[in-house]
Structures are given as structure tokens and as C-alpha cells.
Amino acid sequence: MRIEFFKMTGAGNDFIMFDNRDGKIKNPVELARWVCDRHFGVGADGIILIEKSETADFKMVYYNSDGSFGGMCGNGGRCVAKLAYMLGIAKEKMKFEANKKLYFAEIIDDEKVKLYLPNPRKREFNLKLKLDKKFFKAHFVDSGAPHLVVFTDENGIKNIEKININNLGKKLRFHPRFKHGTNVNFVSIIAEDTIRMRTYERGVEGETLACGTGSVASVIASVEKKKYKNSRQGENFKR
Ligand SMILES: N[C@H](CCC[C@H](N)C(=O)O)C(=O)O
């Protein structure tokens, strides 16, 4: 069987995407594991299927590289919006369904796609998580995907670049407090309006280069805990 695919990256978080409106992909779990392999496949953090929707322009169905169902993905949402626009499935302003929720996206120009995420309701601040006889202070925000935010300064970590994400991140990701597991973001305050974040992703089971819903969760925790300015500066951000 021949299946056309598209590869895109959102800030380094990369995805292989398929137009599955005809339903010809029947085993996405196996497909994700195979094509996401960076040596024996194409290589990506996950796959995204565009499927038919009754309530929106299309449905985004997202699987992590290990084949687990991913729910919502911020970077993937921007990529799939662009693909849907390129394929003529949606216009510049669109709405799509993902994990039974509705999202709005807007194509700004060739390089920019804006994605509107609803305000996360599930937030739990000041958790104390026991790990290897030590307590970690962390905050939990579900921004479409479950995210733990671990501030380096609240946990005596001096240099975020030196954290062994694939070790410490993994332990927190599997902490029994989270029944379905969680993504884990380590965050350092850089300036009044800038944070540095490194993410361990559930389902990729390793550090990824960027995470959209993780960024949103980290900013929410920063505004709450660090009294950040709730600034809209990001809108004018230029590379
Ligand atoms: N990278 C994604 C989030 C993936 C979450 C997924 N790994 C899970 O919760 O299983 C993003 O840009 O929002």
C-alpha cells in the first residue's frame, strides 16, 4: 500500500502527518512506532492523522512515537493546521477537533501559525513529590496534555543545562501520583519575561526539543508562582 506522508517541525518538535480522511490507515499505533523510529523509519516525535469531523474543519488524531495516544499537542496542532491549509482542507482561520475538544488556529504567514488553547482548568500548585528519599516541589497543569512544572530554583538545581533529563525527567514522569503518567518540564527563570524550559515527553520517553502545551503549562506556573507579568509580549516575538 502506498501512503503519502508529510513531515513538519514545530520549533524542533517533529511530526509525520497523514491525510486519513478516507480512513485507510487502520493501525496508527503500529504505524507510529515504525515511522517515528529515527534509524529504521523516517524519524519523528509523533504522528498526526487528519480525519473527518462533524463539528469542525477536521479532526487531529495524535500518537506519540511509542504508539501511545497523545491527546493534544501544541506544536503538532500548529503543524497540522498548516498542513490542512496547504491541502485545502481548511481556510486561514480554522477550527479543529482533538481529543474531543475544539481548538482554533490561524495561518498568519508562511512561517507563523497561531493556535488558541483554552485556559487550562486543571491546575495543582505546590505539590511535594517523593523521589529517592528526596522531595521535589512541582506544579501540575493540564493544558491539553498533562504537564508537571519543576522550577530549578525551588529544588536547589543550579544549572538547568546540566540536568540529566532522561534520568530525572523519567523518574518524575512515572511518579505514582499521576495515574496516566505526565510530561515533565524543568524551568529556570531567565528574565522578567523569559524562561528556559527543558521537557521530558511522555510517549517519546526522552527529551524533545520543544513542547507547545508544556510551554503553556510552564508560563501558567511562572505567572502563578513567580508573579510574572502576564505579558502579551510573545505576540511580537521575532526570531
Ligand atoms: N509535544 C507536545 C505535547 C505532547 C504530549 C504527549 N507527549 C503526551 O502527553 O503524551 C506539544 O507540543 O504540546
Image (spheres, grey):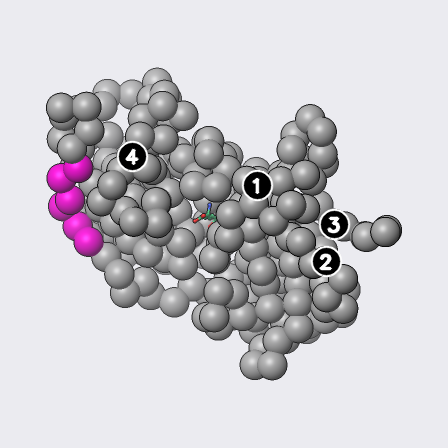
Disc 1 marks which amino acid? Ser
Q: Earlier in the sequence, mark 3 or mark 1?
A: 3
Horizontal arrangement in the rendering, residue 39 relative to residue 212 (left or right): right
- Regarding mark 2 in the picture, which secondary structure is present there? loop
Residue 172: give its label. Answer: 4
Q: Nearer the viewer, mark 2 or mark 4?
A: 2
Residue topped by disc 1: 65
x%, y% of residue 230? 27, 56
Q: Which residues are magenta?
A: 124-129
> Is disc 2's CB within 8 Å of ligand 1?
no
Residue positioned 31% across, 30% down in the render: 171
Disc 3 marks which amino acid? Phe
Label pair 3/1, CB-CB below 8 angstroms: no
Q: Earlier in the sequence, mark 4 or mark 1?
A: 1
Residue topped by disc 2: 25
- Regarding mark 4 in the picture, which secondary structure is present there? helix
User: Real-space Cα distance between discs 2 and 1?
Assistant: 16 Å
